[in-house]
Amino acid sequence: MPAQVNVKICGLTDRASLDAAVAAGARYVGLVFFEKSPRHIGLPEAAELAAAIPEGICKVALVVDAPNEFLDRLLAEVPLDMLQLHGKESPARVIEIKARYGLPVMKAVGIADAADLPPLETYMQVADQILVDAKPPKEAVLPGGNGLAFDWRLIAGRRWPVPWMLAGGLTPDNVEEAIAMTGANQVDVSSGVEHAPGAKDTSKIAAFCGAAHGN
Ligand SMILES: O=C(O)c1ccccc1NCC(=O)[C@H](O)[C@H](O)COP(=O)(O)O
């Protein structure tokens, strides 16, 4: 197991979950700006929550194929440290967003089988980080946050030159095995620390972080 595993808790919408993530040592927290998501947060609520996030914890905005008009407003109203692109953004769009906003960009890439691996290499040329996530099922409403894992053996033993996070179906019960199998030193979770879609569970947040940190 790597010495230090960074945890991202994604889809926070309330202060109690934020406080639980901070207390448990999460290094990243994610806010979802996608109206179809049960984790969607409005800009005024996000600004209030973001203001309560301690210095040193990376505030990540998750967006899906967002136009500049929305990103302009988002970044004017909410203090954020990183953009997570979770749609079908092209490599050129990643470059454009990085240049326009001057923030680090994490691009999510969905994996279901070996044919999905080459885009990882492509996006590593242009993004600051990669979220290696499960590919959503064809009928899914959400492009992420579906609580589905992919076959971790597909990426076992691979080493990449840019920081990356493992995501998709992680839980307090399987995160240790996922880290051991993939060598991930960063992990991201959303539904695995909830008791209902969009409702975070503070004890699961603590358990997940504890397991990821090897406690
Ligand atoms: O979480 C959402 O509702 C969501 C909506 C639209 C795009 C992406 C979304 N989540 C992406 C994440 O960063 C999740 O943490 C990641 O996909 C893992 O989700 P889960 O399998 O639920 O832990």
Image (cartoon, rainbow, N blue to C red):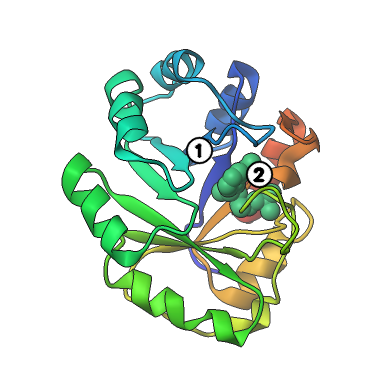
- Residue 72: x and y in percent read 28, 30
Residue 131 lies left or right of residue 93; in this view the side is: right
Quarter location, residue 119: bottom left
State the residue position of label 2: 190
Decide which of 207, 195 is in the foreground and name it.
195
Q: Are marks 1 and 2 in contact (CB under 8 Å)?
A: yes
State the residue position of label 1: 30
Q: Quadrant of the N terminus?
A: bottom right
Q: Kindly identify the residue that appears in the image at 73 percent across and 54 percent down.
A: 140
* Disc 1, SS: strand
- Label 1 lies in ligand 1 vicinity (Cβ under 8 Å): yes
Residue 56, relative to residue 106: is it above or below?
A: above
Amino acid type, mark 1: Gly
Q: CA distance from mark 1 to mark 2?
A: 9 Å
Residue at the right extreme? 195
Of the numbered discs 1 and 2, the one sitting upstream in the chain is 1
Pointer 1 local density, CA inside 10 Å: few below 14, some 14–19, many at least 20? many
Pointer 2 local density, CA inside 10 Å: few below 14, some 14–19, many at least 20? many
